[in-house]
Image (cartoon, helix red, strand yellow):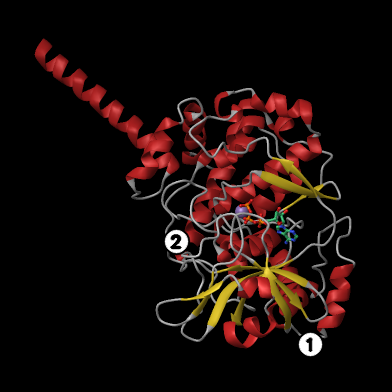
Amino acid sequence: MSLNYAFGFSLFLLVLVGLNIYFFYTLNTAGKQSPNFMIPSLKLDLTSNVFKDIYNYLNYLPSQYKVKNSKFLPVQKILLGSFNLSENINTASVWSETEKWSSQDSLFPYKNGTAGRILHAIQTSQIALVDNAPKGTQLKLLLLLEGKQKIYFKPKRYNLTHVINGNIYGGYDRHNSEVFAYYLAMVLNFRWIPPSVTRRVHLHKHIIPVATMGLKRTMVKNDSGSMCIYGKCFYCRINETVCPDSSGEIEGAAILFLDGQFKTHKSPWRRSYSSRKMEWEIDDDFCKKVKGSISTKRLLNLIDVSIFDFLIQNGDRHRYEVYKDQIILLDNGKGLGNPKVDVMDILAPLYQCCIISPSTWHNLELVSGGVLTDTIKLLSAVRERVLASEEHFKAVERRLLKVYATVQYCIGKHGRAKVFKNGYV
Ligand SMILES: Nc1ncnc2c1ncn2[C@@H]1O[C@H](COP(=O)(O)OP(=O)(O)OP(=O)(O)O)[C@@H](O)[C@H]1O
Ligand SMILES: [Mn+2]
């Protein structure tokens, strides 16, 4: 009898341990993942209790978050109206509009068809000059379009289905992540982001004839005789080139360049980029320290950005730029690396501070149940082929549920009144 007991008890313990392992596994991943990712997710010992709690809320998420919110339909219609092209466009007049860029309300005008006009102009204006853009670690070009508008061009490095394994900040920038980020921001009503669109540029017809000497010096022929660019940047290497495809074109994200003055700050939640742990990774009360050093408005803004970054899995926002007291979303190229992984600690500003601006929460609630995907697809269909693989779209929806669950966790822990900080739009 006692032997039976002992056996039963061991079996129970075994199941318990198994369940625990399963918990942690499913929390940070979806589906099968490479062993590389098991290690960092298991290492998160201190914050893991938070993840477990969030995961519990995820299991009991109210059904409203899993169905389409019909309240978004009128918003979607207005957005579509801003991206659809209904008339011929005079690009010069577009640039004069962007010159006056930011208002109190947004970094660029986007209402009444302006978003569509700006994207059209970025995508089709003739290129007057191309140079290296040496700022930063990644290969990118600076295009001067006719009418003198500057554009950052981040070239395509991977196919849409390519999976980045390893560190969350690993790999080259993903050009589609930049463009996806722009549409995602528009759907979520995050208006502090430069317009970005996919553009294909013919190397021999549209780059070489207007390339600076500096750029020409960073071009080499590859084994098949094609001219390729290795560029000028911190990580640029002569053997890591970008070459034209079979039609002679290079695809990339064309991002409107901001000539305005913005201030750069270090993110309190930045990574160490080494095995050393940052303060936010070991201190449960880290948010208290941040609260003492920045305004509530800035903190809420950082939390908005962390939600945005979590959705695309950009774990590389080591610094942030501020314009007109708003964080602007520059450099969104490190998203969409691995659709099977959800690195939870990108959400640390949210689950450590447990506050969110009511308007952000409202915007998030509006796009539940697949509305987010539908709207990104609808808006981008005007001038993009495909922005991301279906797996990535599903991953973004899965992460949105985790954002909902994190906010529910915060409400459960602190109550609604403390979580929803008013006075910030
Ligand atoms: N659209 C833009 N307009 C003007 N400046 C920009 C724009 N996007 C980025 N920058 C600035 O240019 C610099 C490099 O850009 P970006 O961060 O995209 O490059 P990166 O190679 O990814 O750099 P890092 O490796 O440091 O992240 C940044 O310091 C940023 O402030
Ligand atoms: Mn970057």
In this image, 128 relative to 235: left or right? right
Q: Nearer the viewer, residue 239 or 339?
A: 239
Of the image marks 2 and 1, the number of the one nearer the N terminus: 1
In the rendered image, the quadrant that contains the N terminus is top left
Residue that extends furthest to the top in the rendered view of this protein: 2
Q: Is residue 357 visible?
A: no
* Quadrant in the rendering for residue 405: top right
Residue 55, above or below 186: above
Identify which amino acid the numbered label 1 is placed on. Glu
Under tag 2, what secondary structure?
A: helix
* Quadrant in the rendering for residue 252: bottom right
Q: Is residue 25 visible?
A: yes
In this image, 371 relative to 29: left or right? right
- Residue 321 horizontal/vertical position (percent): 75, 49
x 72%, y 70%: residue: 151
**Quarter of the render that holds ligand 1:** bottom right
Q: Which residue is identified by label 2?
A: 391
Identify which amino acid the numbered label 2 is placed on. Glu
Under tag 1, what secondary structure?
A: loop
Residue 139, above or below 252: above
x 88%, y 75%: residue: 96
Q: What is the distance, in whole Å, between disc 2 and disc 1 at their CAs?
A: 35 Å
- Residue 301 horizontal/vertical position (percent): 74, 43
Q: What crowding class fits label 2: few (fewer than 14 Cα within 10 Å), some (14-19), or many (20 or more)?
A: some
Q: Nearer the viewer, residue 167 or 215?
A: 215
x 67%, y 31%: residue: 353
In this image, 76 relative to 2: left or right? right
Residue 165, above or below 424: below
Residue 87, labelled with which disc? 1
